[in-house]
Image (cartoon, rainbow, N blue to C red):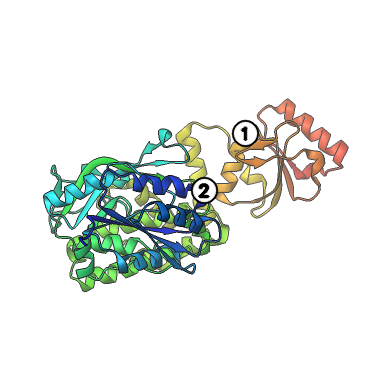
Amino acid sequence: MTEPKVSVIMPVYNAETYLNECIESVLNQTLKDIEIICVDDGSTDNSLLILERYQKKDSRLKILKQKNLYAGTARNKGLEIAQGKYLSFLDADDIFVPYMLEEAYKKAEKVNADIVVFGGRYFENDVNKAYDYPALLRTDMLPDSDFFEPNENFEYLFNFTTPSPWNKLYRRSFIEENQLKFQECKRVNDAYFVEVSLALAKRIGIINKNLIYYRTNNSLSLQGSLNESPLQFYRVLSDIKSKLVSISKYHINEKSFKRFCLSFCIYNLERLTDEKAFTKLYNALKEYIFDELGITGTTADYYYNKYAYNQYTKIMSLTPTAYLLDSCINQKKNTGNEYLFPFGDIKQGSRIILYAAGNVGKIYYRQIQKTRYCNIVAWVDKNIRLAENINIKSPDEVDMNDCDYIVISVEKEAIASEIKENLIKNYKLDPEKIIWRKP
């Protein structure tokens, strides 16, 4: 039996909502000589039943099973049995363009590439509303060719694409010869594999097309577990740095690696939504992470991502709270938005009820979510029942005294005065607890 041209390795965990669409996009590829290795990662929904149904219809699909050990371990399990000349990695909620595998395979064969990199688009539910995500393939950083050979003259090795495996095709012999594996941690288990493989590749092929759709709104995705392990990505970066040093690839790629590290640090920090996790990472960045990654002492002209460098300088000079407040104020300046939550009137960490869910209320809500300055115990409005995907309650459904402050989030003073009078009269509230400032 001849080897298939491509092995598609797909970890599957509780993916029943999107799995049919994903598998169909692989089975219907124009390149037919493929195998699909699906590794069920201890799913508790109908994912395994869906896989078994497809396996009965198409023998190219193979199923492996493991207890819930996460995507890195699942991909490694798939690697153990893969027979394809090339390897492709797909998440169970994403979608391949129909000709993706064929184009990537032909490019790899044409230019004799160890890795082929292509572009992609992000979407929520409808691929017809997908949007471009240039970071997947920064052609402005690449030579004008359909391949390149990394060397000391190429300073964007870790910057021209993201540390994701799903917009790349890998020569299996290259992966096996270098004994590359995915890390078996819960999060960021693919960055080590991707970055080290880029450093080891002798030739990288480029396809300047969007060949994959990446789903961004999956609440079950491990991207939602950032708050559980805010320092995990740093440990991965440290492992990558150690490996680059051991294979004598760090020195020639030092600038590119530091750029990647700084952007990755800021990216991970600003995606945290839990106050304790944010503060923990913020202080760690300031106290030792930036230093250990070699970022401390570098200057602005070292980086192409000026935003990341500006945030780095703020982290080094501000407290976590001041950093978040500064972000809110700058957002206001950049958007021309005149609504700013009355931070100065409220003690940090207070329990508040947000009253009114119109435009001002929505903006206040976002600012509180971003800064984590205080805790919203309830959001109420007499007329509105849904805002920011939050169920809004009527004032009569809430104990209006069960808070430190009630913040009235309306623009017009006359309406605010009417609300305040009602709160004092009908709910016997202390006027000092009621906050309104003209936006």
Viewer can see residue 48: yes
Name the amino acid type tagged 2: Thr
Residue at disc 2, secondary structure = helix
Residue 420's label in the rendered image is none
Give the camera-side residue of 326 and 125: 125
- Residue under the point 14% across and 51% down: 109
Name the amino acid type tagged 1: Val
Tally the numbered discs: 2
Give the camera-side residue of 297 and 268: 268
* Position of 43 relative to 54 (above/below): below
- What crowding class fits label 2: few (fewer than 14 Cα within 10 Å), some (14-19), or many (20 or more)? some
Residue 249 horizontal/vertical position (percent): 19, 66
- What crowding class fits label 1: few (fewer than 14 Cα within 10 Å), some (14-19), or many (20 or more)? some
Residue 271 horizontal/vertical position (percent): 47, 52
Q: Nearer the viewer, mark 1 or mark 2?
A: 2
Q: Residue 384 sits in which quadrant? A: top right
Residue 221 horizontal/vertical position (percent): 48, 54
- Residue under the point 82% across and 40% down: 396
* Position of 216 relative to 88 (above/below): above
Give the camera-side residue of 284 and 378: 378
Residue 348 horizontal/vertical position (percent): 64, 53
User: Which is more N-terminal, label 2 or label 1?
Assistant: 2
The quadrant of the picture occupied by the N terminus is: bottom left
Q: In whole angstroms, how far apart are the C-alphas of marks 1 and 2? A: 35 Å
- Residue under the point 79% across and 51% down: 402
Left or right placement of residue 129 versus residue 160 in this view: right
Which residue is denoted by mark 2 in the rendering? Answer: 17
Residue 360's label in the rendered image is 1
* Position of 6 relative to 179 (above/below): above
